[in-house]
Amino acid sequence: MQIISTTQKLLPDIIGCLRYKIDSNMKHMIWIFGGLSASDGPTGYKAYGAVDGNHDGTVAPYASISSIPFTYDLSMNAIRGMLSKYGPLVWGGEYGFYSAFNVDEAWFSDQYIGIDQGDIILMIETIEQE
């Protein structure tokens, strides 16, 4: 029986994000390390990344932040990058990161998704306990 770590499982997602960035005609640099997940998007809710080619540049901050126990440096870079580049467009203050954004479409959600916020809190608490 082969045991595969969570970090090994996340690597294809990270590589897929980078491949999308390189292969597409994205006009803007986005911080998308492990940020493929179901989320709101410019055309509604979608399961981004579920199959090849199923991504339009939408970033779900909770996805990369929730990976923090497994990809600490990449997740921290994603957090810092999103905040420094997009600030209040991605961070609402009272409850943290908004659900998603897509720079290419000039779309930034103003919604919070409870289950996404819960993932962020639980994963940050996990690293705090280590």
Image (cartoon, rainbow, N blue to C red):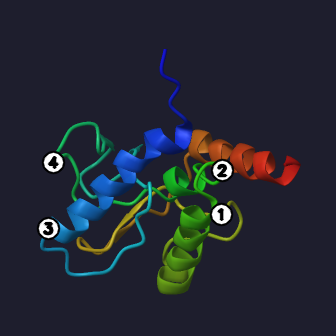
In contact (CB < 8 Å): disc 2 and disc 1: yes
Q: Is residue 40 left or right of residue 57?
A: right
Q: Quadrant of residue 92?
A: bottom right
Mark earlier in primary sequence (2, 4): 4
Pointer 1 residue: 96
Circle 2 sits on which residue?
A: 120
With respect to residue 112, does 90 lie above or below? below
* Residue 39 seen in this snapshot: no
Q: Which residue is mark 4?
A: 53
Q: Front-most of 106 and 53?
A: 53
2 and 4 marks in contact (CB < 8 Å): no
- In the rendered image, residue 115, in percent from the top left (x then y), is placed at 59, 39
Q: Measure how far apart labels 3 and 4 are at the Cα level.
A: 10 Å
Judge by depth and name the residue closer to the eye, 87 or 112.
Answer: 87
The amino acid beneath tag 2 is Ile
Any part of residue 74 in sight: yes
Q: Residues within 10 Å of mark 2 (few under 14, many from 20)?
A: many
Q: Earlier in the sequence, mark 3 or mark 4?
A: 3
Secondary structure under the numbered disc 4 in the rendered image: loop
Q: Earlier in the sequence, mark 2 or mark 1?
A: 1
Q: Position of residue 107 (x, y in %)?
A: 32, 69
Disc 4 residue crowd, few under 14, some 14–19, many 20+, Cα 10 Å: few
Foreground tag (1 vs 3)? 3
In front: label 2 or label 1: 2
- Which residue is painted at 57% across and 45% down in the image? 116
State the mark number for residue 24: 3
Q: Residues within 10 Å of mark 1 (few under 14, many from 20)?
A: few
Res. 65 image quadrant: bottom right
Label 4 is placed on what type of residue? Gly
